Image: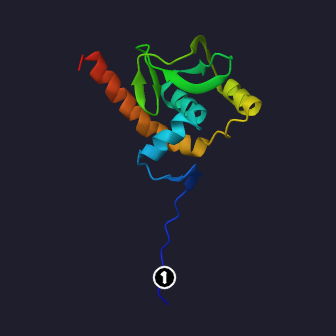
Amino acid sequence: MKSIKVKHMLSLVYGDAIVKLDGNLTPEVRRLFTSGQCHALAAALNEILGWKIGVCIDAKGRETHFVVESPTGKFADANGLHDTAPGVRGEYCDWDYVLHCYRKYGFAKPNMVFARHFAPIIAKELESDGVAEMRGQ
């Protein structure tokens, strides 16, 4: 009898896209982490980089997006480094606050498996962007 090897790959259906846990930063992965799982990514980036988690607040006082702040004062999410992050207030949050927002507003449950998988890949991009920025490139 011939044996068949099956490779299991985690995937997540997000909107009309399937996001695979394969290490590829596709547009779907970036969309997942900028509009739905930004809180999980910010927490995972905080874990590995130590950068503070910032919260974007809308005009009604509702938390709308989570980012991390780099040592150079730029804000970062799955799309890279940004000079500003609209509505980020002067205080920062921790994991407990992220979970509070998840429960209070009905955000998607933080998918830390996906966030912790992609965070090192995104962190490498962010650090490359930061090095280029510091060198004036």
Identify the residue at horizontal 41%, vertical 16% (top origin). 83
Residue farthest to the bottom, as pictured: 1
Left or right: 25 as drawn, with respect to 66: left
Where is residue 96 drawn, in percent x and y? 70, 26
Left or right: 104 as drawn, with respect to 93: right
- 111, above or below 5, in the image: above
Identify the residue at horizontal 47%, vertical 46% (top origin). 28
Quadrant in which the C terminus is drawn:
top left
State the residue position of label 1. Answer: 3
Identify the residue at horizontal 62%, vertical 19% (top origin). 58
Identified by mark 1, the residue type is: Ser
Q: Nearer the viewer, residue 31 or 21?
A: 31
Identify the residue at horizontal 41%, vertical 48% (top origin). 24
- 22, above or below 83, in the image: below
Where is residue 114 drawn, in percent x and y? 55, 45
Tell me which corner region of the image, top left, top right, bottom left or bottom right, holds residue 65.
top right
Where is residue 101 drawn, in percent x and y? 70, 28
Label 1, secondary structure: give it: loop
- 100, above or below 70, in the image: below
Left or right: 2 as drawn, with respect to 99: left
